[in-house]
Image (cartoon, helix red, strand yellow):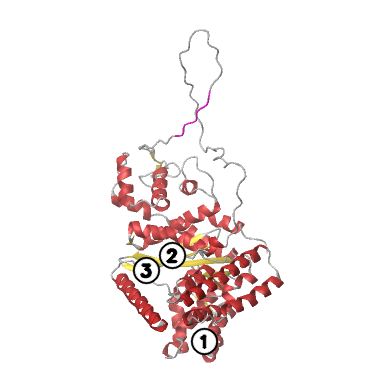
Amino acid sequence: MAELFGEVAALKQTVAEQREEIARLKGLKGRPNIKPSGMEKGTAPAKPIPETKRRGRGKITLKVKIEEKVIGIEVPPGSVFKGHEAFLVQDLVISANATCYLRERWLTPDGRTILAPLPQGIAGHFGPELRRFVLMQYHQGQSTMPRLLAFLRSVGIAISKRQLVRLLNENHAAFLAEAQNVLRAGLQTSPWVSVDDTGARHGGKNGFCTQIGNEWFTWFRTRSSKSRLNFLDLLRAGHTDYVLNDAAYAYMREHGLSAASIARLAACPETRFANQAAWMAHLERLGLTTLKVTPDPVQIATEGALWGSVQAHEFLCDAVILSDDAGQFNIGRHALCWVHAERLVHKLDTFTDQHRDAQTRVRGLIWDFYADLKAFQLKPGKRQAATLRARFDRIFLRRTGFATLDRLLARLHANKAELLMVLARPEIPLHTNGSENDIRCQVIRRKISAGTRSDIGRECRDAFLSLAKTCDKLGIAVWDYLGSRLKVAGHAIIAPLDHYVRARRRPA
């Protein structure tokens, strides 16, 4: 009977997956049915109960100059003046301002025309404060274009929808370059990165937005594919070369490329190729494109050359990639999220009391083990690591009598090295909650604005969301950052964000 229940549950799961696939092909997005785990909060130490009353909000620190106004009052004769009682009021002034610059124009004796330059920060017919407000409200404020357009017009700004689109998408090469530099700094200096992806619409088609980041930076990029080739290309951080080196050959051997094909590649003196066209021409000369074997030699060799390029540019040299077990992220030093692993046990369909008891017992063991892993991070040691490894085997090699659960435990045990990466690298997190929190802004943008149409619109959206998230993590106000980059009068001095990311590098 239990086997029949299992088959029915599997068929229901298949039907649900087919419905989601139909919705995806129609351009719809089905809501994932993911049960919350609760393991992270459940294993957190209990917060101490405060003995005193709750602390107030604290002193308010103003960032603006305070204007003082004295308010008088009529008093009876003979009254004694006792000074002033301060009452602070904060307000916001929103008003439109238009300036017509009369630029002097001179004709020199040699026939040249000299025109007085515009003030710093003026680029086009909309000032830097307006541009800062538009970028801030659209990207960090997650406003929609129609609402932003209606607001600007309501305060007196004469602007069309096309002009607003240009403010959002044009002349932002410096921002795009800075976002890419942030990724390069993060990949070169971080001991670990957490990765995730989500659906994204572009040009009326379904795509995928990949997130890469950690506690100091975040970076997004939307592509039409989420394959391993795509992920390796993103890890090159804008470089286009393909490199054959020790890391590339090691990758090819690990992923089953034949020794004969590797020997052909290693026999050639040329090891660096400028772009994809040069690399594919090289593979064609070696005859790898004509081989019809499994695994595909062209794909494995290309992935290896991309990984060689990543290592050649000193990206992720000793860093750990933390993921939710999506296959495309299994590259280099790889660690798995414990919350996603426990969720597989949590969402198992159970049909009898025996099944439910086995599931509850195993979840309890995993929760206790997870709490001890968190304690190990605070005080690591070789003896504790050996004890935890042996305990892992006892948990995931047990036989519960629930066949589906036993198969799942065996599958999780096969990922032992990746689940226990924290024993060798205690600094890495045990979960990918940070990535899921970061990528939420992309999900919100997708829900309120559907998708992007132009390539430059897609790149600007990804870049500005990356920069805004990175500013938040570095403790920099996005408003101040935009003011610094757009040369707003009296702006704060904000250095390039990649400098701050590199400064966070922990000493070895």
Who comes first in sequence, dot 3 or dot 1?
3
Magenta stretch: helix, strand or loop mostly:
loop
The x and y percentages for residue 83 are 56, 19
Residue at figure coordinates x 33%, y 71% from the top left: 20
Who comes first in sequence, dot 3 or dot 2?
3
- Label 2 to label 1, Cα distance in Å? 29 Å
Helix, strand or loop status at disc 3 = strand
Q: What are the residue bounds of the magenta stretch?
A: 85-90
- Label 3 to label 2, Cα distance in Å? 11 Å
Disc sitting over residue 186 in the figure? none
Helix, strand or loop status at disc 1 = loop
Reading the image, the residue beneath label 1 is 256
**Exactly how many numbered labels are in the figure?**
3
Compare residues 253 and 377 and report the one nearer the observer. 377
Check disc 1: other Cα within 10 Å, few if <14, some if 14-19, many if 20+: few
Q: Between label 3 and label 2, give the one nearer the viewer.
A: 3
Reading the image, the residue beneath label 3 is 207
Say what amino acid the circle numbered 3 marks: Gly
The x and y percentages for residue 112 are 39, 45
- Label 3 to label 1, Cα distance in Å? 29 Å
Helix, strand or loop status at disc 2 = strand
Image quarter where the N terminus lies is: bottom left
Say if mark 3 contacts mark 2, CB within 8 Å: no
Check disc 2: other Cα within 10 Å, few if <14, some if 14-19, many if 20+: some
